[in-house]
Image (cartoon, coloured by chain):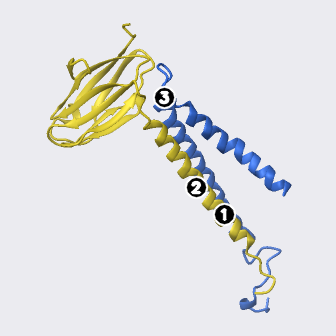
Amino acid sequence: MSGHSNWPEWIYVGVVIALMVWVGAEAWEAERLVEHVPADAKIIKVTGQQWFWTFEHEDGTKEIGELHVETGKAYKFEIESKDVNHSFNIHDYVILMDAIPGRVNTVWFAPTDVGEHDIQCREYCGLIHYNMRGTLYVEEPSS
Amino acid sequence: MKKLVGLFLVLAVIVVIPAIESAFAAGDEPGEYLDRRAVIWNLFFRMMTIAFVVGAVVSGTMIWQCWRFRESHPKAKPTAYEGTDW
């Protein structure tokens, strides 16, 4: 068609592609940052089972239903399940990771402020799923 | 050409430099850990901003097209396939 110009369409296509690339890059970058575990992170083994959480620190100390950590330190959770699928969630620290039988999933965080935070299961896992809770105690560093 | 250079300079300031900074900010130094809450919620709010801006631009364009290309618009012209019997 003579006199027809389709440059607005090409600009539209370019803007859409640029936006998609930008959104993808931002999400990729955030994921890369969040998954970068610090080398000195202390490992805490987290085990989910119907219907409570068990925690085991590097020194062998075990806790049930509550977890004590210290500010200024990084912790890497190694999460697994003994029976069915669970999901380990500390909402205040944006931690959410599935606990799957026969598989170890990892997630890390570094608590910043002293306080108490809820731990809960976020995958329906049976009758008492609603009460599969725990408490995270963030304390001042002991040393 | 100058406009292109200007455009890329602006893009560098608003996209590339903050991305590089945040990449290097993920240090391994004890006590200088990344705050995952900040990273994740920042991403969420940025994505929401983009989503709402795109939604507003797209729906605004559609509304403008309906308004501008209605038959009763003062500047409306018949297209070839509509004939010239207006």
Local crowd size for mark 2, using a 10 Å CA cut-off: few (<14), some (14–19), many (≥20): few
Position of A50 relative to B53 (above/below): above
Q: Residues within 10 Å of mark 3 (few under 14, many from 20)?
A: some
Chain for disc number 3: B
Q: Colour of chain A?
A: yellow
Which residue sits furthest front? A39
Residue underneath mark 1: A14
- Chain letter of disc 2 in the image: A
> Can the viewer see residue B62 in this picture?
no
Q: Which residue is mark 2?
A: A21
Q: Position of residue A64 (x, y in %)?
A: 19, 22
A4 vs A63: above or below: below
Q: How would you rate the neighbour count of disc 1 (Cα within 10 Å): few for under 14, some for 14-19, many for 20 or more?
A: few
Q: Are marks 1 and 2 in contact (CB under 8 Å)?
A: no
Q: Sequence order check: which comes first, mark 1 or mark 2?
A: 1
* Along the line of sight, the residue nearer the viewer: A34 or A137: A34
Rounded to the nearest whole Å, what is the CA distance between mark 2 and mark 3? 25 Å
Tell me which corner region of the image, top left, top right, bottom left or bottom right, holds residue A110.
Answer: top left
- Asked which secondary structure carries label 1, the reply is helix
Q: Amino acid at mark 1?
A: Gly
Q: Choose top left, top right, bottom left or bottom right for residue B77.
A: bottom right
Q: Nearer the viewer, residue A58 or B9?
A: A58
Secondary structure of the residue carrying numbered label 3: loop
| Pointers 1 and 2 within a single chain | yes
Q: Which chain is blue?
A: B
Look at the numbered disc 2 and give the secondary structure of its residue.
helix
Look at mark 3 in the image and give the residue it sits on. Answer: B35
